[in-house]
Amino acid sequence: MRFNEVFHEILHTWSWIAGVVFALVVVVLGWAVVFNRAGRRRRPLFRVSQNVRLELGYAAVLAAVAAVLVIVGFGANARVHDGEGNTAEAVPAERIDVTAYRWCWDFRYTSAPIQVTGECRGGEMPTVVVPAGRPVEFALTSHDVIHSFWLPDFAVKRDANPGQVNELRMTFPEQGRWKGRCSEYCGTHHVTMDFWVEVVSPEEYQDYLAGGGTAV
């Protein structure tokens, strides 16, 4: 399952829950307004001493809603972190070491002596080439401050922290070219801290590695 599919699934579930809660609140408020305007407020609407069961009911409903949100969220988070995709887990991932710095990106391939970097300004955005249909593991860190590796079209994001390596494993299902960004405000040129992800066929990817990063 692609990351954006997980995101939309969670958004759909949470939207339904939020819609139901909103509708209940509107109904209760509307009833309270009508009850008040009719001049029927002879005493407080709710007294804890006389509505223990009602209060416990509130608590139970809120606990149930919270439990559903937590369970669904943790389940989706586990699927994303496990690198769920269309490729068997037995296939080894292509590992790329990614170092963020003010204000651009450095990509180093572990399966070939290839390093890709740039200035991220004036159109000089680095392009990281990856294979379609095969798992790719990005090992993310930062040279200076906290940055964030963000692929908007795939609804995936992972922080790049100094002195720490965060791993992001994912599979790109089809060939194409997508823009990545830094989503963590990191200073003066944060707005231009972009990069390209070029997804090619496995054969083209092997040619790219064999050519030292110049075949694509």
Image (tube, grey):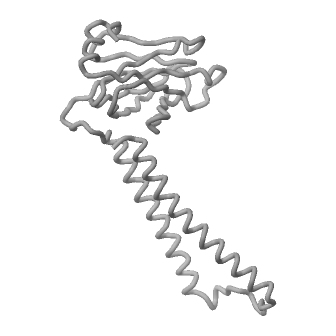
Q: At 37% across and 21% down in the image, what residue appears?
A: 97
The percent position of residue 91, horizontal first and vertical second, equals 20, 32
Q: At 49% across and 27% down in the image, what residue appears?
A: 180
* Residue closer to the observer: 26 or 105: 26
The percent position of residue 46, horizontal first and vertical second, equals 68, 85
* Residue closer to the observer: 49 or 103: 103
Q: At 35% across and 26% down in the image, what residue appears?
A: 175
* Residue closer to the observer: 123 or 59: 123
Q: Quadrant of the N terminus?
A: top left
Q: Quadrant of residue 92?
A: top left
The percent position of residue 52, horizontal first and vertical second, equals 57, 86
Q: Is residue 209 above or below residue 38?
A: above
Q: Quadrant of the C terminus?
A: top left
Q: Is residue 80 above or below residue 214?
A: below
Spot the residue most to the left.
Answer: 90
Q: At 60% across and 20% down in the image, what residue appears?
A: 192
Instruction: Classify residue 17 as left or right of residue 131.
Output: right
Q: Is residue 26 above or below residue 201?
A: below
Q: Quadrant of residue 43?
A: bottom right
The percent position of residue 93, horizontal first and vertical second, equals 26, 28
Q: Quadrant of residue 94?
A: top left
